[in-house]
Image (cartoon, rainbow, N blue to C red):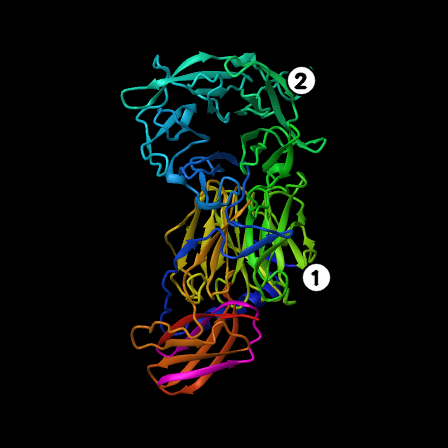
Amino acid sequence: MRLALLRQDSEPDDFAIRSLTRLFLTIAVLLATPGEFVMAQDHQLVRVVSPFSVTDAGLSLRYPFLGGFDGPRPEFVDIDGDGDLDLFVQEHVGSVMFFRNDGSGQSADFVFVTDDYQRLDVGQWFTFADVDGDQDLDLLAEQPFGRIRVYRNDGGTSQPAFTPSADTLKTDTGDVIVTEPPTLPVVVDVDCNGRLDLMIGRQSGTISRYEWIGTDGNGDPVFTFVEDRYQGIEVVGGIGKRGGSALHGASAMSFSDLDGDNDPDLLWGDFFEPNLILFRNEGTCGTPALVRESDAAMRSGADAVNTSGFNAPRVTDIDADGALDLFVGVQGGAFVTSSSSVENFYRFEEVNGAFDLVTRRYLPVIDVGSEAAPVIADLTGDGNPDIAVGNIISPFDPTHASLALIKKTPTGLDVLGTDVISFQGFSATPAAVDLDCDLDIDLFIGGFDGTIRSYVNNGSGGADAWALDESNFAGIDVGSNSAPSWADIDSDGDADLFVGEGAGNVNYFKNIGSRCAPVLTLEQEQFAGIDAGQRSRPALADYDADGDVDLFVGSDDGTVRFYRNVGSPQAHQFVEGEPILVPVTGIVSPALGDLDGDGDLDVIIGVASGGLLYYRNDRVVTAREALPRTAGNVPTVRTIYPNPAGERVVVEVELPHAGRLGIEVVDMLGRVVLRKSYQSLPAGSVRLPLIGLELASGVYVLRIVGATGQASATFAIRR
């Protein structure tokens, strides 16, 4: 595929001049159409974490659209007093996920409840403990500058209700207790005296210990300082152990009786350690004596299980079988963090006194690594919407980014592969369109360097369908972090190109050629005056089904902005609407498509932790949908049936006057795929059959144009 790029300051060739003339003539004719376009009402978006079946290498994903994990921090506690352990997982700063155990102590069944448990601002870490002595679990969490916030449980053991203390945690002498993020403190009774100890790892590799001594007049906990070098521990990681410069890093600890001798041992995860360090307690419960025994507590048979480092351990007996279970959230330390961007929630089970690997993905979800960037299109040529998802860097090879392919199946989705295209660059951000008119979808992938690479589809319908065509598509370079999206913004029948960039603008390249022989010219460097802040990622489609293209723009502030097109298919005018508020932080990338087959466009959002969020469009399309009448003296679409349709659909319209009527069918990129005209129709209710439709599966807008106005409605094609 070769595409000419015509910039405004360049000298156009004869072909470009002829193409531009045709475009202007087409726009002039379309703008002459009388009447105003009728906008559809807003559709309600509802986030769903498990909308349909999703499988990955034969594994069923219970909650596929959780958004992925980059550095999960798990905590197991019985928060509702029903005798079994519930699960809390922190992935994002400031919030924590909650999974209620609806099973039993012997057979856990974790049911996702919320991304933001009781809307508690937990900063960079959290831990549960009864720190006010009332026999229920309170919560300690990080505040800015390493301070500690206490959330006192005023609800009880079965219905917890957390209230923040008025002040940060202090000692009995009034000193503020300060942690050193990203170190993860724990609360445990290390000397079995009935008083909890707050254990804070320091970046020097040591442990500070504070002991609980009671509560103050407000019922808030009070700790007293004990020591800064608990048990003389000083963890030196990495090259420091080999005689080089001493390396100290962030730490995560877990104190548990690992050997059944009734005293707490210590597992230590460190930024500069790829495994867990085991400190065995060779003393007693009241007089501990911790000795460093092993630097490889995580095993798979005889082999050590190493990660990218900074492993956060939690020990419990999740199935009450008498054998301890070790759960590890890999935070990512000094060893190629991308290698743990998918496999980062480990479970080990105690076997013969050692922890043996059970799984690297305890909560498997759709996850492509980090900074997921999706696009929805019929990528496999079977008439159904599939998903391609780029990432910032491949989990399998740190020298480049990659692209995953997720196929639509009769029952849901199937992840065909997470490294379908090895993108020779970073921050792969795909767009999809059939630009060469060969009836299959080609891919255009933006990257960190600001250019776009094009991949042609060989028509195989599989994961190996695409081959690199141009390494710098049309010579486009927007500086950094190019993010392409195609749409027919001017309704001339060909796709125009929109490219997000690192500076937050959306660049508009108008196609002044044709659908099968495109020629792009840079029309605007800041389309519609939009500035998304940093790293804009646009997605265009007719979201509100009014016959023109609307715009969603993601950015690195975690917001998806929505711009409704209140103009016409030929003359766009964008007005900013309500954004989609997502429960994550970092870069977000929207994509639109009808994944649930109900005839309207749903929204999926790629997020920084490498997964996807799914927002269902709750507009319901029935088999014979009664659509609202258009106010005034204009034509109205009354029904479209069957809906979804196959090769035949019947449109029932209400005409206020006898006369001519035009019908257009428009795809979600804004391209007119069918035109039909009627020279003389009677006034009143008229049924118009459209027969022999050769359209791919998907959502379409049907637009009617009469002498006194226009109207539109959506319908779906299912093959």
Q: Is residue 272 above or below residue 20?
A: above
- Of the two numbered discs 1 and 2 on the same chain, state the one appearing first in sequence: 2
Is 208 displayed left or right of 172 in the figure?
right
Q: Which residue does the numbered mark 1 point to in the structure image?
A: 458
| Label 1, residues with CA under 10 Å away: few <14, some 14-19, many ≥20 | some
Magenta stretch in the rendered image? 684-708
* Residue at disc 1, secondary structure: loop
Residue 670, horizontal then vertical, whole percent: 49, 65
Is 157 displayed left or right of 260 in the figure?
left
Q: Is residue 131 in view?
A: yes
Residue 547, horizontal then vertical, whole percent: 44, 67
Q: In this rendering, which labeled residue sits more in front, label 1 or label 2?
A: 2
Quadrant of the snapshot with the N terminus: bottom right
Residue 280, horizontal then vertical, whole percent: 60, 19
Is 425 displayed left or right of 603 in the figure?
right
- Give whichever of 570, 14 is nearer the camera: 570
Q: Which residue does the numbered mark 2 point to in the structure image?
A: 241
